[in-house]
Amino acid sequence: MSLFLALVTQVLHIALMLAAAPLLTGLVRWLKARLLGRVGASPLQPWRDLARLARKQPVLAENATMLFEIAPVVQFAAIGVAALLVPSFALGMASAPVADLLVIAGLLTLARCTLALAAMDIGTGFGGIGASREMMFGVFAEPALLMVIFTLTLLAGTTNLDTITELLREGSFGLRVSLGLAAVAFVAVALTETGRIPIDNSATHLELTMVHEAMVLEYSGRDLALIDGAAMLKLLLWFTLIGTVFVPFGAAPAGAGPLAWLVGLVCWGLKMGVLAAALAVLETAQAKMRVFRVPEFLGIALLLGLLAAVFLFVSQGFA
Amino acid sequence: MTLPDSLAPVLIGFVVLGLFALGLAGALLPRRAWGIAAAAAALCGVGALAAFVFLLAGAPAEGFAVPLGLPGTSAQLGLDALSGFFLLLLFATGAACSVYALDAHEAEDRRALPCFPVFIGAMALTLLAADSFSLVFGFELMSLASWAMVLARHEEPASRDAALLYLGIATFGAACLIPALALLAPLGPHGLDLRFAAMRAAPPEGWRATAVLVLVLLGAGSKAGLVPLHVWLPLAHPAAPSHVSALMSGAMTKVALYVIVRLLFDICGPVQPLWWGVPLLVAGAASAVLGGLRANMEADLKSVLAASTIEHVGFIAIGLGLALTARAADLPALASLALGAALLHALNHGVFKTLLFLCAGAAQHGAGSRLLARLGGLIHQMPVTTTCALAGCAGLAALPPGPGFASEWLLFQSVLAAPRIGGIAMQTLFAVVAALMAMAAALAAAAAVRLIGVAFLGRPRTPRAAAAEDATPAARWAMIGLAAIAGLLGLLPGPVLALADPALRALTGSDMADRAGWLAVAPTAEATGYAPIVIAFLLAAAGAALVAVMRRWTVAGSRRGSFWANGFAAAPAWLPFGDPATQYGGASFAQPLRRSLGTALLAAREVVDTPPPGDTRAARLDAGLADPADTLLFAPIRRLRERLSVEADRMQFLTIRRVLTVMFVALVLFLAVVALLEAR
């Protein structure tokens, strides 16, 4: 019975993630438009865009190779599997035993490397500039992310996301300075990984500032739909990660029934809404920073992550 | 001569003997290159099989004496779980490199012919050694044989310089390793007892132990490529023929790490202080970051790979340091996790780095260069090589479910569990090491993307690269075989760790048997872990589902058009692939990292030389770097050597009177020393 429940939650979870990803991006865009005093497109617009793109035949460059054609599938699959592992409305999904934070980070790296390689495949200046900058961001984001994982592991004793959430929910750690510091570092990493302002601007087509958009410039049609869809899924994935780890309340416990799921769903929706609003405000209030300021920004995140760990050592006499 | 009971040690002993004989044959019959390479491949295959069977059988330790060696003694050889594990790595990669060598017919390959089997044999001898003399003999023979092959292209000054630096470092290594072994040897009835068994019975203590630690780290660490003695790797490894570079990076660095494990874990015994792991941790973390960064800066395909070897050796050293610390803190489970991760990473790195060097060799052979600036677009003409290089780079970048990820996952788990040890200083050190490991892993990913993206993807940068030819059949099979092994290693870390279990039990008192199964590996017996097969299955299922959905609901097929060239005019007819300079190259891909990290860590510089208005000369961007180890450590040594040789040179031109005076003073000093010693 519990296995059946785990499987059902798993299927519902991934369906929910796939369906909600474009909605979340649409919501952020709509909120940003409202904040700027524009009417804004409906939050459903990204869904329509994806559907429209999917109907179109892609135009490939003359020298595009197999790698260029399969890269969108590989990177969507990698992000999709990562999304499969991050619990949204219920804990104890079928994937819980393999839902490891390091594995999730590894899968996201797989997606990033795949896209960077595809960007280099045609041999255009844009592809190269995007790929090299994206890989540079990774060099500074990964250590900060690892320090957050380090702090969580110190508290929970494992890198398994499900167990960490379970333990954080019980609140046995209280409200900790460490967790607060780690949360700030985590948000900085999330902004980098999802390519939002102030790191990257997903709405720009100004040539010199593009990072993600520069990498996918040669894609069109259904391939572009896959890539855009994956980017939207990645945003939802990071939001869900933030919501699950740092606001671990509301999600249905393992083995609970549909009523708890509904509560979990509402809570998850609320978290996503609040985070979307926060992102919209941040993106409206901030300007994109220069590429070479990003290492400093992420350096601060790394420092906060390190501080979080050291605070734990001091406060717990951790030994 | 005593013979062991089982077959495996005898078989491996004969394989080593056979390899030395092949070396002789290579010197006498230089025209039989194919036959010698084939025989080396067969011997290595037998050796790998024997080591594998030996490990499967639970690795019962066996020792045997060979009536060779120092006067009055016989050489002690032995085969136990640790040497068996490294022999498996050595012979597996050695077999692949020998198969690759079947088609190697260039002049430099012929010159390397006699040394190549001797090189493998010497490494095997080092791994089999059970006394100091055999160990040093094997180690130095390995250095000498590889040095001769680094000189294979001796017409080039760069090759000669690299060989000279390598020789200097090897001499320095020997000068550290031999005293370390002498310090370890207890005084027996006939002078120092050099047998490992006797050394094990009397582990060093106090200053002796400290001296041994420092000397072993300098002696073997210089060969493994640990910071700050790493500068020779990106110079010397690429200078040798490709199948030799592959073994130097894939296997020889591991033999040096084996010496570290053998001496520091096995012979020095478990009763050592807590801080013993710290030097390894610090050197490992520094190597990981510096190596990863240099791998992003090098302009030569093989130098990139050699620099990334520094990084991965750093990872393994971190694992070893953690294991030493955990063992001293009496946490055997953590010690075996860290040591198991280090051993697994050594094996994985050995396989995928060998694979990548063979790919680089194929690219050099097929496209006529290994400079990133002269390659590009090889995927069109060399699909097999490119696919194999992609498989290798998945390991290099530690992408799941590849081989690199499994072992690095375990390494991360051990460093995440490490803060149970020590006070706040130690714990903070672990946190910093963890952050640096993450940075190194991301640097490796960037280096892997750069390597594949610039050399194999994009548009050809030279006509020669446009007309590249894929690897010859033998090279192709060597690469495909290694890629298949790398894939298996990635999917089955648990069974591979089971092979290392006897070694872990012997060295840490605990093993991974309860934590490493067919399906998953885990840091503790209760915890959930990393299940590569499940992840691979999920990825495959997701990919298949996506393809099915696209087939069903979207338009099939695609059209071709020209790419967006930023509005530039079409390239002239004599540039059929467009102007190659309009795409990103190795130097431009590295620019963000060079500016953000390179200036601080590697003293990288960029000078833009723009001509004034009206001047028609081209603008220049001058970029370069200076490794701090080179400027701070090696440059002064080089200057000192220069000064000493100038001074020594002067002695040759003294007048007869002065020569006589010098000789007289030397004689008096010598007699004084003798008299003093007598008087004591």
Image: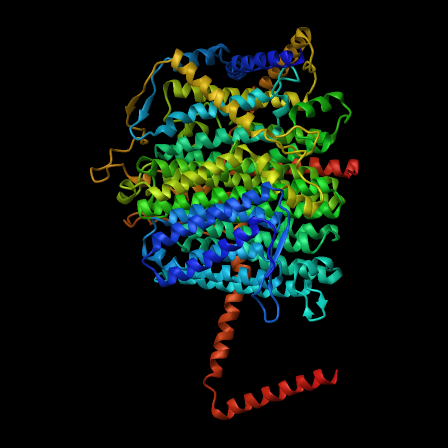
| Outermost residue toward the bottom in this view | B657
| Outermost residue toward the top in this view | A259
- Residue at 43% x, 24% y is A72
Q: Position of residue B377 (x, y in %)?
A: 33, 37
Nearest the viewer among B604 and B484 is B484
Q: Is residue B335 visible?
A: yes
Q: On screen, B247 above or below B481? A: below
Q: Is residue B651 left or right of residue B34?
A: right
Q: On screen, B382 above or below A72? A: below
Q: Position of residue A267 (x, y in %)?
A: 66, 13
Nearest the viewer among B664 and B178 is B178
Q: Is residue B475 left or right of residue B191?
A: left
Nearest the viewer among B554 and A232 is B554
Q: Position of residue B376 (x, y in %)?
A: 34, 40
Q: Position of residue A262 (x, y in %)?
A: 65, 8
Nearest the viewer among A23 and B246 is B246
Q: How many marks do you count on the picture?
A: 0
Q: Is residue B231 left or right of residue A310?
A: left
- Residue at 33% x, 29% y is A64
Q: Is residue B474 left or right of residue A280?
A: left
Q: On screen, B630 above or below A318? A: below
